[in-house]
Image (spheres, rainbow, N blue to C red):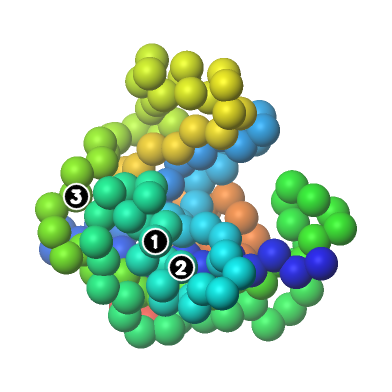
């Protein structure tokens, strides 16, 4: 079974890269914002929906960066193959979601949500000078981080 994921690379005016820190079923993951493609949805619409749902943020989806071109098994279900699609994303308004400075800096209300849903996320920007593939957890994200750094560096 295929699991199609769509992610946005947002670089702000301060030359910082947006990442999402998440705990999913006990696994600590730092990744790019985005999520799963729903039936009947295009990839760009998926990314817009994900940013709206997760960050309450309207975005413009920019240039395509990368689509997975090798076999990658899901980190959460070994019967699933992950296909990830990455685009640049630009905020069309001020970010309303709380932004953290430190990784996995969840507040008490977020931890209560985690106790019920076994998933939690928060967002932060990483300075361009220190951003690299080691800043993200998932294998495809690491590849894309290197691509973005080499292209925009």
Mark-to-mark CA distance, 1 and 3: 15 Å
Mark-to-mark CA distance, 3 and 2: 19 Å
Quarter of the view holding residue 128: bottom left
Quarter of the view holding residue 8: bottom left
Numbered label attached to residue 20: none
Does 12 sit left or right of 86 as displayed?
left
Query: Which is more foreground, mark 3 or mark 2?
Result: 2
Pointer 3: what residue? 95
Q: Determine contact: label 1, label 2, CB under 8 Å.
A: yes
Q: What residue is at 49 percent from the left and 33 percent from the top?
A: 120
Q: Secondary structure at mark 1?
A: helix
Numbered label attached to residue 46: 2
Task: Say which quadrant the N terminus sits in.
Answer: bottom right
**Callout 3: 10 Å neighbours few (<14), some, many (20+)?**
few
Query: Which is more foreground, mark 1 or mark 3?
Result: 1
Q: Position of residue 60 (x, y in %)?
A: 26, 73
Pointer 1: what residue? 49
Q: Determine contact: label 3, label 2, CB under 8 Å.
A: no
């Amino acid at each position: 079974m295929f699991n199609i994921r769509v992610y946005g690379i947002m670089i702000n005016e301060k030359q910082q890269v947006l990442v999402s820190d998440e705990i999913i079923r006990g696994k600590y993951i730092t990744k790019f914002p985005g999520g799963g493609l729903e039936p009947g949805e295009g990839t760009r619409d998926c990314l817009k929906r994900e940013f709206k749902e997760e960050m309450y943020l309207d975005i413009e989806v920019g240039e395509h960066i990368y689509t997975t071109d090798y076999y990658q098994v899901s980190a959460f279900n070994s019967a699933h193959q992950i296909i990830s699609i990455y685009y640049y994303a630009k905020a069309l308004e001020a970010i309303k979601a709380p932004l953290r400075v430190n990784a996995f800096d969840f507040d008490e209300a977020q931890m209560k949500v985690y106790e019920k849903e076994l998933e939690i996320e928060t967002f932060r920007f990483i300075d361009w000078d220190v951003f690299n593939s080691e800043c993200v957890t998932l294998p495809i994200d690491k590849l894309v981080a290197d691509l973005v750094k080499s292209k925009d560096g």
